[in-house]
Amino acid sequence: MPAFGVQLESHFWSGRVNRRFVPISKILKPVINECVTPVTCYWSLALILRGDEELTLVFKELQPPVKMLIPVWKALCKATTDKESSMSI
């Protein structure tokens, strides 16, 4: 069982909860995307995963401010960089 990773959760009004655990070894790179619509612009945090063709959004429905996304993004970048350097030893 992986010791470190990201748990993505979706909570529904019915009380149902979908949980998905992404091991840190599967994360190739976390990215911050600028999303532009005809009426607004917002930022989103996504993960590029090994073996997946599409980006995995961390916040599917929420649009947190970029000030909240940057510390999470930096921590994920550090964790994935540390993982790569420890794997090469």
Image (cartoon, helix red, strand yellow):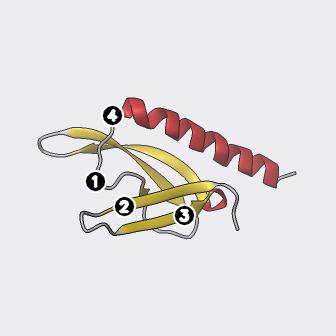
- Residue at mark 3: 21
Of all residues shown, which one is farthest toward the top? 67
Does 54 sit above or below residue 79?
below
The disc placed on residue 74 is none
Work out whether mark 3 precedes mark 4 in sequence or the reverse, and give the earlier one.
3
> Which residue type carries mark 1?
Glu
In the drawing, does residue 63 fall left or right of residue 54? left
Of all residues shown, which one is farthest toward the left? 39
Alpha carbon of mark 1 to alpha carbon of mark 4: how far?
13 Å
Q: Nearer the viewer, mark 4 or mark 2?
A: 2
Considering the image in quadrants, where does the N terminus appear? Answer: bottom right
- Residue at mark 1: 61
> Which residue type carries mark 2?
Ser
In front: 62, or 85?
62
Of all residues shown, which one is farthest toward the front? 15
Element type where label 4 sits in the image: loop
Query: Which residue lies at the image location 56% right of the left edge and 70% below the top edge?
Result: 51
> Which residue type carries mark 3?
Phe
> How far across and down, in percent of the image, does residue 68 sit?
41, 33
